[in-house]
Image (tube, rainbow, N blue to C red):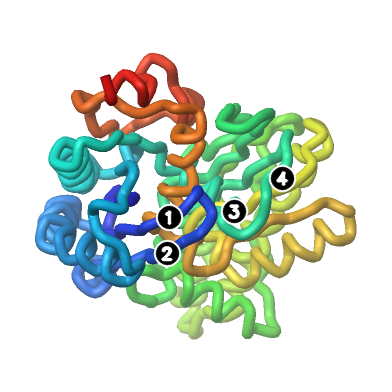
Amino acid sequence: MSIETSCDETSVAIVRNGREVLSNMVSSQIDVHRRFGGVVPEIASRKHVETITVMLEQALQEADVTMADVDAIAVTQGPGLVGSLLVGVVAAKSLSMALDIPLIGTHHIAGHIYANRLVEEIEYPCMALVVSGGHTELVLLEEEGKFQVIGRTRDDAVGEAYDKVARAVGFPYPGGPHIDRLAVESTEEVEMPRAWLDPESYDFSFSGLKSAVLNAVNQAKMKGDEPNYAGIARGFQLSVIDVLIGKAMRAVQQYGAKQLLLCGGVAANRGLRAALAERCAAGGIPLLIPPFEYCTDNAAMIGAAAYLKWQHGQSTPLDFKAEPSFSLERGPCNPCRMQLLSSIDN
């Protein structure tokens, strides 16, 4: 059983052998937070408290199993909103103690990366392009469970940039799907700058692009014209895609990666998925992209990542804490926070 409550989705899944998803129940809070234009942490944690028990019951029912069939409890340890994380952590600890079964704290981004393993086997070394509301990173996996972040955003993550641009265009939260739709359907493009940074850098920056969008909107309004929102959306999306794909492809070549993995909520973006598939096909690079239901936050991906620890006979001590700034490079099998499963049995 795996639990995910890092932000504004309450999710519980039952995953067999790290690959077979028996159930993956997700309760979204989008309608609750839409009126505020973004996630309100206090409200998010309160909704998790109200929903977690229902999700637990529905996950068991959907999988047609009982608590007696559960071998271990996995839960997102971080990163995320501390109040939201705590709800899942407390629920997982309670179940672990009550059932006397191992507890496995799991990194949220490791979950996004290993969501790909739910559909296809991962070959090492591989490169992961992580794109979500709070993260934009290039992560090298030299071997199973060993992460090296070679590039990260210096300001806004891709998802944040999409939401801010959507607000400027007049779309409600979450704005990413609206911008994606407008960009894909548009036949016009308002050209936007590309932030490549230093020639050898794998880091990202989208604050300048966001400012360019705002300038294009404001300049049109100052002239008394209606902004070309469709063209602006397309120009913005093409700029984002060019930089993401350009850096990812260069990283794959430099590090000799056998596969490129697309991970995170923005992996559901149709424009990005199509462009990346085209570039990888042309370059002969195997591309792994999770189905849409495993792109956004969900517990099945946490179960997939936690299974790596289970395979190595490792669990997390019951005194572990939720970590809002959990480092990915500490890895899902961090020895300083792990203990052998056999020690629990003793």
* Cα gap from disc 3 to disc 2, whole angstroms: 16 Å
Three-letter code for the amino acid on which mark 4 is drawn: Ala
Q: Amino acid at mark 1?
A: Val
Q: Is residue 157 left or right of residue 201?
A: left
The kind of residue on which mark 2 rests is Leu
Q: Residue at x 34, y 35 (%)?
A: 104
In this rendering, the label closer to the viewer, 1 or 3: 1
Write down the residue under mark 1: 15
Q: Earlier in the sequence, mark 4 or mark 2?
A: 2
Q: Secondary structure at mark 3?
A: helix
Q: CA distance from mark 4 to mark 3?
A: 17 Å
Dots 1, 2 in contact, CB < 8 A: yes
| Residue at position x 54%, y 66% in the image | 268
Ranked by sequence position, the earlier of labels 1 and 2 is 1
Q: Secondary structure at mark 1?
A: strand
The amino acid sitting under disc 3 is: Asn
Residue at the spot of label 2:
22
Q: How packed is label 1: few (under 14 Cα within 10 Å), some, or many (20 or more)?
A: many
> Residue at the location (76% across, 33% down)?
199
Res. 306 in view: yes
Q: Horizontal and vertical percent for residue 142?
A: 68, 29
Residue matched to label 3: 116
State the residue position of label 4.
Answer: 248
Of marks 1 and 4, which one's residue comes earlier in the chain?
A: 1
Q: Earlier in the sequence, mark 1 or mark 3?
A: 1
Foreground disc of the pair 4, 2:
2
Quadrant containing the C terminus in the rendered view: top left
* Residue 280 placement, left or right of 60: right
Q: Residue furthest top?
A: 336
- Find residue 231 and report its image quarter: bottom right
